[in-house]
Image (cartoon, grey):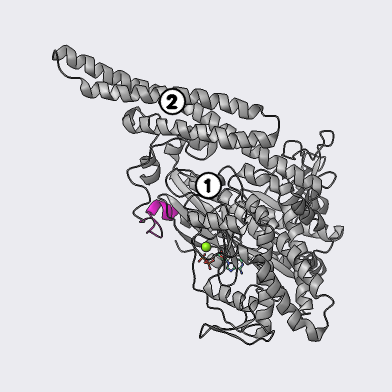
């Protein structure tokens, strides 16, 4: 049935329109000021908002509220409190105060803190983030909040994200003022995350311990067909998938999430959803919600949504593309090449700032997407390589080259002449280039950071990106600050020129999947941090500690705490995978192999008893192969168990993580090889779990 979408859209969100309707005028104004300028919120305003929120929530069926936050796990956290307040005569009223809106005090002791929170001070607090709208889900009013320890250290992803947006705002505004645009009050970053995912049959999912415990398959022989026919990408949607996507869109729209594009992806059973971009903070919250809603809606359709980065071997895994830009309060996109030379100057300043930021902090960007799951993608020929580089396209690269060489650039004729003058070239936007192998691509009026994994929050990459760009803008400002107005143009030109010259090594327009690029990148001195344990130590390298502490994004303690949490998370993830694999091979697959061997032996014995002297060569050969493989599996299990125990026993977390990566993962791969060969030999009826063929092609 056709619905009134504009009416449906945001119907569960306490948005600006509702606030204007529900709040007294002065209160509404004060709240808008807080949202737009980040000014302090007075308690009387908070009280007024709380009353309006509660009334609206109750009208819309809510009985509870929750401070919704993003601890250092991959999921969000919530504790629901009802609005009821006993009046003493056996009755209740529905109550909610400004204090309850603004601050919560959950017990923080069971969330990862990386050693930040001393055990004697288990309390943490959540603080309302008025810049991300509250919403209703399942009868509860959700209030987006930041989560800190009682002594003020960030225990979540939102706190540093908001700090990074603030620092970028400050530095970008300062730069714009220096460039002569003094009307700008505010610059915010924008993000549009494209989300990939798999859908599998729920009944089949439940039969796979690896999917249930780890989110990805640890064994599984390839199906007869994979993605080689290239018939899934943008293919027509199967009715069940279409029904799922339809429901998903509606649920997201109700929550004010502007889901826009949906399509089938490259791998069988793989799909993608992209929203319209939003302010980073809101986009990050929305992406968290989107992942959650995807899972919930899938369940309703008898499906399971897999968000793991590498659910299946041999076909593409899932990532997320973080489309990123900066926009002024007047709505001007700072990465939009302009029509006039002045606009172009501004564009080039911000463009080169991003180029330098990515070059200076490529290690941090790599870390910001590092996880056990994503390690299976980065560097494989399906996702960008683990080396961070920037794609600009031929035209923009030519423009930058002409600046570097003091040549004149003519876009139309594509000729470059030396004019000697220190003026910036004229060029207009003409960006039709596409490069799918670049980790960080300029796509006309935004950058697309493509290394993100599908399961992780998009907060980290944006914290790094915002802070790194802010730092470069700060350096730029320092160089331009004392320049006389009449010298500004040539100073800016010189700055851009210097920056290009110093950082052009990060620009690579070619194919990132080739071995030649890996060698070339090494010659250029770019980082190639192949795995999470290789990358993580850079997080606390001096230059990075300096960056984050100077911009007040993280204290040194907070940085170390995150490093610990990520290492532990990596260790635990692979430990669970190893345990699961042991269980599946030992308790499920091996017994199936033995059962099949028994059947085959019985067939041989029976044959011989009926026809004396008959050949049982086939049976013998099969038995031999299965014996060989089961022998390998038993040995592989032993080795995996021993090595896992040793990796776990490593005292130093960095050593432990490295042992999991270099030894345990290799063991798992080896065990998998025998297991998959055995699986391919035994009949489906004896297999303890559904095959790749069923998982990928049954819907
Ligand atoms: P693609 O060809 O990669 O699908 P699209 O133009 O469709 O590119 O955009 C992909 C994503 O980029 C969408 O989520 C879109 O809203 C987002 N996007 C577009 N402009 C911006 C911007 N200025 N800042 C951040 N994200 C943006
Ligand atoms: Mg894209």
Tell me which residue sits at (54%, 50%) in the image. 378
Q: CA distance from mark 1 to mark 2?
A: 26 Å
- Above or below 120: residue 289: below
> SS at mark 1?
loop
Of residues 243 and 315, the one drawn nearer to the viewer in this rendering: 315
- Crowding at dot 1, Cα within 10 Å, few <14 / some 14-19 / many 20+, comes out as many
Of residues 619 and 173, the one drawn nearer to the viewer in this rendering: 619
Q: Which mark is residue 644?
A: none
Numbered circles on residues, count: 2
Of residues 412 and 575, the one drawn nearer to the viewer in this rendering: 412
Of residues 611 and 18, the one drawn nearer to the viewer in this rendering: 611
Residue 312: x %, y % from top left? 45, 43
Q: Which mark is nearer the camera, 1 or 2? A: 2
Q: Where is the N terminus found, in terms of image quarters?
A: bottom left
Residue 423: x %, y % from top left? 68, 85
Using the rendered image of the protein, determine whether residue 195 is visible from the camera's viewpoint. Answer: no
Q: Quadrant of residue 575?
A: top right
- Above or below 207: residue 35: below
Tell me which residue sits at (57%, 52%) in the image. 386
Q: Quadrant of residue 84?
A: top right
Q: Earlier in the sequence, mark 1 or mark 2?
A: 1
Using the rendered image of the protein, determine whether residue 267 is visible from the camera's viewpoint. Answer: yes
Residue 650: x %, y % from top left? 67, 29
Q: State if disc 2 and disc 1 touch (CB < 8 Å).
A: no
> SS at mark 2?
helix
Task: Please tell me whether residue 686 belongs to the stretch shown in magenta.
Answer: no
Task: Please tell me whether residue 232 belongs to the stretch shown in magenta.
Answer: yes
| Horizontal side of residue 245 vs 609, given as left or right | right
Please report the bounds of the magenta region as a residue range.
231-244
- The residue that disc 2 covers is 633
Tell me which residue sits at (66%, 26%) in the image. 649
- The residue that disc 1 covers is 309
């Amino acid at each position: 049935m056709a619905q009134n979408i504009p009416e449906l859209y945001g119907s569960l969100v306490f948005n600006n329109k509702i606030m204007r309707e529900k709040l007294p005028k002065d209160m509404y104004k004060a709240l808008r000021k807080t949202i737009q300028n980040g000014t302090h919120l007075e308690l009387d305003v908070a009280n007024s908002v709380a009353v309006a929120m509660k009334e609206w929530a109750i009208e819309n069926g809510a009985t509870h509220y929750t401070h919704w936050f993003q601890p250092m796990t991959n999921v969000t956290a919530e504790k629901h409190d009802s609005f009821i307040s006993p009046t003493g005569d056996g009755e209740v009223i529905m109550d909610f105060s400004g204090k309850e809106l603004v601050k919560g005090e959950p017990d923080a002791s069971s969330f990862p803190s990386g050693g930040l929170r001393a055990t004697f001070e288990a309390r943490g607090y959540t603080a309302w983030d008025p810049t991300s709208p509250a919403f209703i889900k399942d009868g509860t009013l959700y209030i987006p909040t930041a989560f800190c320890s009682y002594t003020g250290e960030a225990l979540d992803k939102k706190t540093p994200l908001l700090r990074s947006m603030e620092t970028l705002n400050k530095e970008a505004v300062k730069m714009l003022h220096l460039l002569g645009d003094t009307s700008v009050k505010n610059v915010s970053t924008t993000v549009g995350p494209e989300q990939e995912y798999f859908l599998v049959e729920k009944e089949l999912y439940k039969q796979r311990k690896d999917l249930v415990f780890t989110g990805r398959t640890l064994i599984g022989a390839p199906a007869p067909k994979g993605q080689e026919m290239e018939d899934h990408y943008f293919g027509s949607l199967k009715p069940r998938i279409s029904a799922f996507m339809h429901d998903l869109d509606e649920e997201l729209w109700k929550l004010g999430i502007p889901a826009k594009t949906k399509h089938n992806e490259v791998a069988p059973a793989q799909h993608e959803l992209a929203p319209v971009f939003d302010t980073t903070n809101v986009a990050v919250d929305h992406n968290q919600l989107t992942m959650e809603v995807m899972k919930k809606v899938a369940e309703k359709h008898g499906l399971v949504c897999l968000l793991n980065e590498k659910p299946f071997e041999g076909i593409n895994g899932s990532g997320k593309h973080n489309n990123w830009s900066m926009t002024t309060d007047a709505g001007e996109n700072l990465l939009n090449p302009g029509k006039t030379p002045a606009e172009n100057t501004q564009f080039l300043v911000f463009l080169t700032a991003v180029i330098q930021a990515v070059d200076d902090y490529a290690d941090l960007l790599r870390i910001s997407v590092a996880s056990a799951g994503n390690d299976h993608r980065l560097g494989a020929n399906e996702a960008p390589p683990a080396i961070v580089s920037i794609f600009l396209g031929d035209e923009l690269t030519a423009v930058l080259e002409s600046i570097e060489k003091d040549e004149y650039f003519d876009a139309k004729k594509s000729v470059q002449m030396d004019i000697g003058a220190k003026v910036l070239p004229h060029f207009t936007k003409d960006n039709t280039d596409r490069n799918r192998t670049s980790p960080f691509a300029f796509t006309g009026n935004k950058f697309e950071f493509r290394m993100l994994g599908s399961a992780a929050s998009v907060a980290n990459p944006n914290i790094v990106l915002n802070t790194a760009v802010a730092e470069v803008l700060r350096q730029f400002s320092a160089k331009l600050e004392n320049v006389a107005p009449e010298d500004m143009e040539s100073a800016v030109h010189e700055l851009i020129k210097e920056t290009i010259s110093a950082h052009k090594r990060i620009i690579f327009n070619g194919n990132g999947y080739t071995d030649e690029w890996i060698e070339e990148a090494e010659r250029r001195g770019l980082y190639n941090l192949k795995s999470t344990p290789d990358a993580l130590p850079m997080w606390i390298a001096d230059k990075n500690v300096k960056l984050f502490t100077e911009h007040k994004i993280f204290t040194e303690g907070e940085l170390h705490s995150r490093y610990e949490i990520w290492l532990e998370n990596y260790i635990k993830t692979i430990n669970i995978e190893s345990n699961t694999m042991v269980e599946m091979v030992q308790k499920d697959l091996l017994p199936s192999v033995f059962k099949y061997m028994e059947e085959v032996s019985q067939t041989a014995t029976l044959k011989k008893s009926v026809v004396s002297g008959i050949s049982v060569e086939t049976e013998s050969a099969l038995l031999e192969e299965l014996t060989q493989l089961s022998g390998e599996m038993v040995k592989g299990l032993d080795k995996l168990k021993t090595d896992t125990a040793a990796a776990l026993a490593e005292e130093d977390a960095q050593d432990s993580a490295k042992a999991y990566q270099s030894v345990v993962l290799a063991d798992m791969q080896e065990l998998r090889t025998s297991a998959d060969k055995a699986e391919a030999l035994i009949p489906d009826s004896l297999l303890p779990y559904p095959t790749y063929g069923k998982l990928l092609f049954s819907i």
